[in-house]
């Protein structure tokens, strides 16, 4: 198999074994066409991240943000970018999109253990690798058709979207380079969420990335927030700037009041601390997902190594 075939098959499985930078531009275009996965590499600079982060803080009106375990790229940034305050949002700095979703679903599993999780079928390659980290949750993960969901609201009113369901949505359709819904469409969809007590996870990673209009792409977040719908917003700066190896992201939990935001932040810090205080554990999850059938053997070896370390 050549590199192109390897990548196409790997994306379908949710695993990308080689670096994007190793591929030629023509290969990237072919991958994007055949896998419907838009890959771009805009120019990167620290000033660009600072400028964009300031725009995010201003546009989303972000509140207290805890910077936890971020890599060197984010540590170099001016911390005052994240010092705006709003009592209804708890924001936690995380490593990349996968870790953001890992934390989000771990929290939701505690809050709503019986809730079904729905993700768009067209986005499965993007999220399938993440779900390998949650074997206990996988049985509750279901697929839905984006076109039916976004443009036929009666579908959302019927089973299987029963009250309490958790629905993941990309607020920007990066393949078509346009928002999936009009502002009016998002308002109607938000009304359905409110009526049926649904929980929204909005993937904000591509806002401004395909359309070039960051403020317009942010409108769904404001709509869901104004309707007081339980909402989690996932940001991934890595993909937005075309630097997937940088692993910089943040999760925003919209909470009803200041005290809830403080309590939630404390709970999340406890939840994700092992990911950063024990880096080997984090990367063992990555390795075990790639090993596939040999994952159990690898995990047993890793446990034995840990036991040996504890004895010493």
Image (cartoon, rainbow, N blue to C red):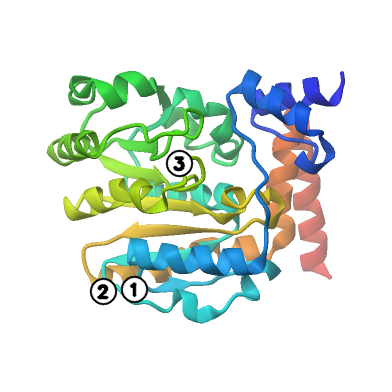
- Image-quadrant location for residue 192: top left
- Image-quadrant location for residue 255: bottom left
Residue on which the image places disc 2: 259
Local secondary structure at mark 2: helix
Quadrant housing the C terminus? bottom right
Q: In the image, residue 82 lies at what x, y percent? A: 46, 74
Marks 3 and 1 sit apart, C-alpha to C-alpha, by: 34 Å
Marks 3 and 2 sit apart, C-alpha to C-alpha, by: 36 Å
Q: Which of marks 3 and 1 is nearer the N terminus?
A: 3
Residue found at the very far front of the displayed protein: 212
Residue at 87% across / 21% down in the picture? 2
| Badge 3: residue crowd in 10 Å (few <14, some 14–19, many ≥20) | some
Q: In the image, residue 253 lies at what x, y percent? A: 35, 58
Residue 275 is left or right of residue 195, and the answer is right
Q: Residue 211 carries which label?
A: 3
Q: In the image, residue 139 lies at what x, y percent? A: 46, 28
Residue on which the image places disc 1: 262
Residue at 60% across / 75% down in the picture? 77
Residue at 46% across / 50% down in the picture? 106
């Amino acid at each position: 198999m050549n590199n192109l075939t390897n990548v196409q098959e790997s994306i379908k499985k949710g695993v990308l074994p080689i670096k994007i930078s190793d591929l030629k531009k023509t290969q990237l275009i072919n991958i994007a066409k055949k896998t419907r996965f838009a890959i771009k590499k805009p120019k990167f600079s620290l000033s660009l991240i600072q400028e964009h982060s300031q725009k995010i803080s201003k546009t989303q009106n972000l509140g207290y943000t805890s910077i936890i375990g971020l890599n060197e790229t984010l540590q170099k940034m001016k911390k005052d970018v994240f010092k705006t305050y709003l009592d209804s949002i708890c924001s936690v700095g995380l490593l990349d999109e996968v870790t953001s979703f890992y934390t989000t679903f771990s929290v939701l599993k505690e809050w709503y253990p019986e809730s079904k999780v729905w993700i768009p079928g067209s986005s499965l390659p993007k999220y399938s690798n993440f779900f390998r980290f949650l074997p206990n949750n996988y049985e509750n993960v279901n697929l839905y058709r984006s076109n039916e969901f976004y443009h036929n609201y009666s579908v959302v009113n019927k089973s299987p979207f029963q009250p309490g369901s958790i629905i993941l949505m990309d607020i920007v359709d990066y393949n078509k380079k346009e928002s999936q819904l009009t502002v009016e469409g998002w308002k109607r969809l938000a009304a359905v969420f409110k009526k049926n007590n649904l929980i929204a996870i909005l993937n904000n990673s591509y806002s401004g990335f395909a359309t070039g209009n960051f403020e317009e792409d942010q409108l769904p977040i404001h709509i869901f927030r104004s309707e007081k719908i339980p909402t989690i917003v996932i940001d991934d700066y890595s993909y937005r700037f075309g630097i997937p190896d940088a692993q910089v992201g943040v999760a925003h939990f919209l909470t009803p009041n200041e005290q809830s935001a403080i309590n939630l932040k404390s709970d999340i810090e406890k939840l994700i601390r092992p990911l950063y205080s024990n880096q080997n554990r984090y990367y063992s999850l990555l390795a075990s997902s790639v090993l596939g059938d040999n994952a159990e053997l690898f995990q047993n070896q890793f446990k034995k190594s840990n036991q040996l370390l504890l004895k010493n």
